[in-house]
């Protein structure tokens, strides 16, 4: 699903206590994961405490890429072009250590493909501090709006401009931390250039 | 709240029947609106049918601007820089015709400031087809991550690169619809240039 490759963040809706909360979060995708249709992985901090109770209810994960402002001749037909995926389901808490490791690698690699293999493995302490949850991708429902402004017959007789303002995400040059002497890795340079083309 | 000016879409979490759903949506802001702290406005189609039942429960509206990929020396400290606002509350259905008109103008003007004044007013049929809801901005909780990768004492002894890949949204040149003979309005050109600087 190209949208899930292109997008960097998801919005997770969970029931937390008496409230529904929607939070931005990183994610990872395993098209060959153990869940129906492949697996969407999210992670959270054990200390934050809100992810574990959320496992008792269905959650909704929505990923959206905004692609343009649609400026019609009428306010009514102003809109946006976008792609979105909505995944609703009861999350599975990932407990198998191998799958947890793999899920965390996928979340890192979603940011920069290939990066996890260049890092030291997570420690036991780091793994213990992290909740990993999985959702089946089979349930994903996709929605998309593309193209120009909706035009009703009467709108042709209106005056005024109508059109589209395309928007996209770009990256700028990677900024190296002060304490680092290594050059920016090729993987990171490639990813920054690629984000500029999405 | 600068974030709400900069962001173009919100994610609305609602309870719809037995499910929690998170959907991307346009929004408008009136800092001097009638609700506590000012008003956040959303709109939806009467025909779509999901917005009206959602009024019976609290909803959550989350606005997020992604600002960078944080690439630490450890997978555990990989993160993202972002700003987000979370507004939770019982939505008020806007029924006053003057406020409805103003809210719809604000949603259009959020896309392109000043544009609503250049369009014909909404018709009665258009107004009747639209649900407008309001939320108080006083309840907005802001969250932000900025700066470099979290560094633990031991990480200084690790090898490898760490740094930030800044990301931002840009707009490209407006695309005029085939049936339009007017030049691209100054307002739209200015907005496209401004989006490129956010």
Image: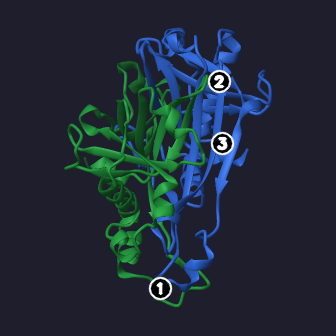
Chain colours: A green, B blue
Q: As rendered, which of B181 and B54 lies closer to the eye?
A: B54
Residue A159 appears left or right of B94: left
Chain bearing mark 1:
B
User: Which corner quadrant holds the C terminus of chain A?
Assistant: bottom left
Helix, strand or loop at mark 2: helix
Q: Which mark is residue B103?
A: 2
Q: Residue at x 49, y 53 (%)?
A: A130
Task: From the image, tell me which residue sits under label 3.
Answer: B4
Q: Residue at x 40, y 75 (%)?
A: A119
Q: CA distance from mark 1 to mark 2?
A: 54 Å
Task: From the image, tell me which residue sits under label 1.
Answer: B159
Query: Mark 2 or 3, which is nearer the eye?
Result: 3
The crowding category of the residue bearing disc 2, from other C-alpha atoms within 10 Å (few below 14, some 14 to 19, many at least 20), is: many
Which of the two discs, 2 and 3, labels the residue nearer the N terminus? 3
Query: Mark 1 or 2, which is nearer the eye?
Result: 1
- Is residue A13 at all visible to an observer of this figure? yes
Same-chain check, marks 2 and 3: yes
Q: CA distance from mark 2 to mark 3?
A: 15 Å
Residue B106 is situated, as x and y percent measured from the top left of the image, at 64, 30
Indicate whether B17 appears above or below B149: above
Chain bearing mark 3:
B
Residue B101 appears left or right of A129: right
Indicate whether B170 appears above or below B131: below
Same-chain check, marks 1 and 2: yes
Which of the two discs, 1 and 2, labels the residue nearer the N terminus? 2
- Is residue A160 at all visible to an observer of this figure? no
Q: CA distance from mark 3 to mark 1?
A: 40 Å
Residue B76 appears left or right of A39: right
Q: Residue at x 35, y 30 (%)?
A: A89
Residue A129 appears left or right of B140: left
Residue B76 is situated, as x and y percent measured from the top left of the image, at 49, 64
């Amino acid at each position: 699903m190209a949208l899930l490759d292109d997008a960097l963040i998801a919005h997770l809706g969970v029931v937390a206590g008496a409230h529904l909360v929607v939070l931005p979060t990183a994610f990872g995708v395993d098209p060959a994961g153990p869940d129906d249709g492949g697996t969407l992985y999210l992670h959270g901090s054990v200390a934050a405490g809100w992810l574990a109770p959320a496992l008792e209810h269905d959650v909704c994960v929505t990923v959206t890429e905004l692609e343009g402002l649609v400026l019609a001749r009428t306010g009514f037909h102003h809109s946006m072009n976008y792609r979105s995926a909505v995944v609703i389901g009861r999350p599975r808490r990932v407990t198998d250590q191998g799958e947890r490791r793999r899920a965390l690698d996928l979340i890192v690699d979603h940011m920069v493909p290939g990066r996890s293999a260049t890092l030291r493995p997570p420690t036991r302490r780091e793994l213990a501090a992290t909740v990993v949850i999985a959702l089946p991708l089979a349930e994903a429902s996709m929605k998309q709006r593309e193209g120009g402004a909706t035009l009703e017959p009467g709108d042709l007789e209106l005056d005024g401009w109508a059109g589209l303002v395309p928007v996209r995400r770009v990256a700028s040059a990677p900024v190296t931390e002060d304490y680092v002497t290594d050059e920016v890795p090729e993987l990171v340079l490639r990813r920054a250039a690629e984000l500029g083309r999405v």
